[in-house]
Amino acid sequence: MTLDNPFFPYIAVMVSGLVAAIAIGSIAFFNSKRPAGWEGAARPRYVPQYEAPPTWEIGWTEQAERWNGRLAMLGFAISIAVEALVGHSVLASVLGLR
């Protein structure tokens, strides 16, 4: 890979993002563990208590429609990004128009 590769900035951002995510995630993971000898101690007040998520319901529910909308927005954003990178639309490449 050379520096004149047009995808070099994209790859550099992705690699640096991966390294940052691993570093920050590792720090958060190790900071979330209680020190030795504190296993039986009460939870501090500043650590939030989360409720268990609701069970997944099958069928035409509000939760299913919300996820359908989220995934549709994600797919639309990805198709716009691909169109910007490639130069033509995803639909055109699927239909063989370009």
Image (cartoon, helix red, strand yellow):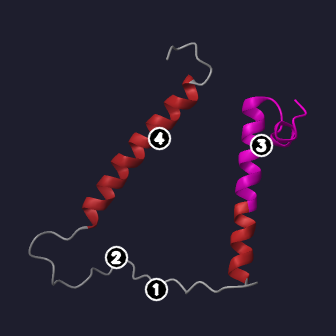
First in residue order: circle 3 vs circle 2: 2
Amino acid at dot 1: Glu
Q: Residue at x 27, y 79 (%)?
A: 44
Q: Determine which of the numbered discs, if any, sits on residue 46 in the image.
A: 2
**Labels 3, 2: front one:** 3
Q: Is residue 27 left or right of residue 89?
A: left
Binning the other alpha carbons within 10 Å of mark 2 as few (below 14), some (14 to 19) or many (20 upward) gives few
Quarter-of-image position of residue 75: bottom right
Q: What mark, if any, has residue 51 been given in the picture? A: 1
Foreground label between 1 and 2:
1
Query: Residue beneath label 3, please?
Result: 80
For mark 2, give the secondary structure: loop
* Circle 4 Cα neighbour tier, 10 Å, few/some/many (<14 / 14–19 / ≥20): few
Of residues 74 and 27, the one drawn nearer to the viewer in this rendering: 74
Is 30 displayed left or right of 95 in the figure? left
Q: CA distance from mark 3 to mark 1?
A: 37 Å
The residue where tag 4 is placed is 17
Tag 2 near tag 4, CB within 8 Å? no
Amino acid tagged 2: Tyr
Q: Is residue 97 magenta?
A: yes
